[in-house]
Image: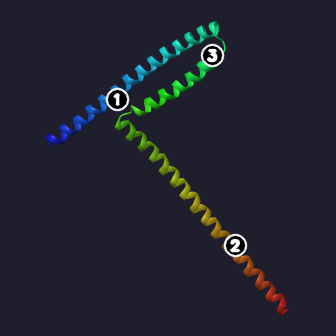
Amino acid sequence: MQAAKYTRDQAEIKKKTMAARQKQRSKLNERLSKRQQQLDKKHRAELETVAPEAVQLADQHSEERAALAELQQKLTATQEELAAEKAKHQTALAALAAKHDEELRMQQVRRQDLSRASTSSADITARLCHRVAQI
């Protein structure tokens, strides 16, 4: 009983610690992002005054840096964050698969109903033709 409580408490502490770290990391990332944007604006203004044609190259480099920063942020995710993201995507995929299965089932039911209806109408037509032929 004591061991189970200790394990549960440790798990809660770990969750709280991870949440605090994630919050702190996101605040730091926001602050660094704002600082980088300020530096980019300053650099762009300096480039426009000195070499206007270099602004396009600077924009291209800025986009590349942003893509690299995003990739780096994804690579530094913890295993728990990756597991949580994977679970979220698997849940979404499972819901989508269930929806598709239901749609497939409904289409099969409709197809069976239509085939029964067409069979019934074909039988009725055949019977009518047979009776007309008898008359």
SS at badge 3: helix
Three-letter amino acid code at disc 1?
A: Ala
Are there few (<14), some (14-19), or many (20+) residues within 10 Å of tag 1?
few
Residue beneath disc 2: 117
Are there few (<14), some (14-19), or many (20+) residues within 10 Å of tag 3?
some
Please name the residue shown 15% across and 41% down the image.
3
In the displayed structure, 58 sits above or below 131; it is above
SS at badge 1: helix
Q: Which mark is residue 50?
A: none
Q: Does residue 127 appear left or right of residue 92 in this picture?
A: right
**Comes first in the chain, label 1 or label 2:** 1
The residue closer to the viewer here, 30 or 59, is 59
x, y percentage for residue 31?
44, 17
SS at badge 2: helix
Are there few (<14), some (14-19), or many (20+) residues within 10 Å of tag 2?
few
Residue beneath disc 3: 55
Q: CA distance from mark 3 to mark 2?
A: 70 Å
Please name the residue shown 35% across and 34% down the image.
78
Q: Check the image and name the residue furthest to the bottom.
A: 134
Q: CA distance from mark 1 to mark 2?
A: 60 Å
Residue beneath disc 1: 19
Q: Which image quarter holds the N terminus?
A: top left
Three-letter amino acid code at disc 3?
A: Val
